[in-house]
Image (cartoon, rainbow, N blue to C red):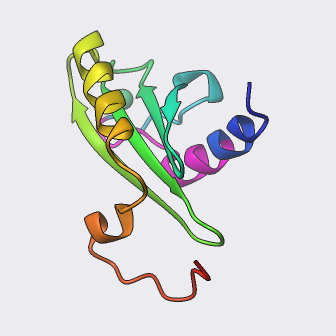
Amino acid sequence: MDPRWERVRAIVLNLVERCAVCGQRFDPEDLQALGRSRSTWAFRLTCRSCGVSSLIAAVIGEEEFAVSSAHSKREPVTERDVEEIRTFLEHFDGDFQRLFGYSGNGGGR
Ligand SMILES: [Zn+2]
């Protein structure tokens, strides 16, 4: 396993921190790595308190970090959702900055 997972996971947890629905603090075990493309990492985040699942897409840039909750709903995330985000990652090669609509300056790319 990529050792960066742990670090990325810690960053994501730090950014998300609490369930948007019930305010429960997330634990590292609540965040499950799904896969990654070149610079995008996908996670499934499940609140153990209220059961809300979210798919989290995190973009790891050179120095910047952006996280987006791609999906959020009360039902458990299904395999189909997971497939969707995997497909999304496969066809996606790092244009998240455009997707998020911010102009990243100083990427040094
Ligand atoms: Zn919750």
In the rendered view, would you say 99 is above or below 53?
below
Q: Does the segment drawn in magenta span residue 46?
A: no
Q: Is residue 101 left or right of residue 6?
A: left
Where ligand 1 lies, by image quadrant? top left
In the rendered view, would you say 16 is above or below 61?
above
Q: Residue at x 32, y 21 (%)?
A: 82
**Residue 73 x %, y %:** 20, 29
Q: Is residue 107 left or right of residue 91?
A: right
Residue at the farthest right position: 3
Q: Is residue 73 left or right of residue 24?
A: left
Q: Quadrant of the N terminus?
A: top right
In the rendered view, would you say 5 is above or below 76?
below
Q: Quadrant of the C terminus?
A: bottom right
**Residue 102 x %, y %:** 33, 78
Residue at the farthest bottom position: 105
**Residue 17 x %, y %:** 53, 46
Q: Residue at x 45, y 18 (%)?
A: 48
Where are the magenta residues, as a range?
A: 10-21
Instruction: Name the quadrant containing residue 51.
Output: top left
Number of numbered tags placed on the structure image: 0
Q: Residue at x 68, y 36 (%)?
A: 5
In the rendered view, would you say 106 is above or below 53?
below
**Residue 77 x %, y %:** 28, 18
Residue at the farthest top position: 79
Instruction: Name the quadrant containing residue 87.
Output: top left
Q: Does the segment drawn in magenta span residue 11?
A: yes
Q: Residue at x 50, y 29 (%)?
A: 35
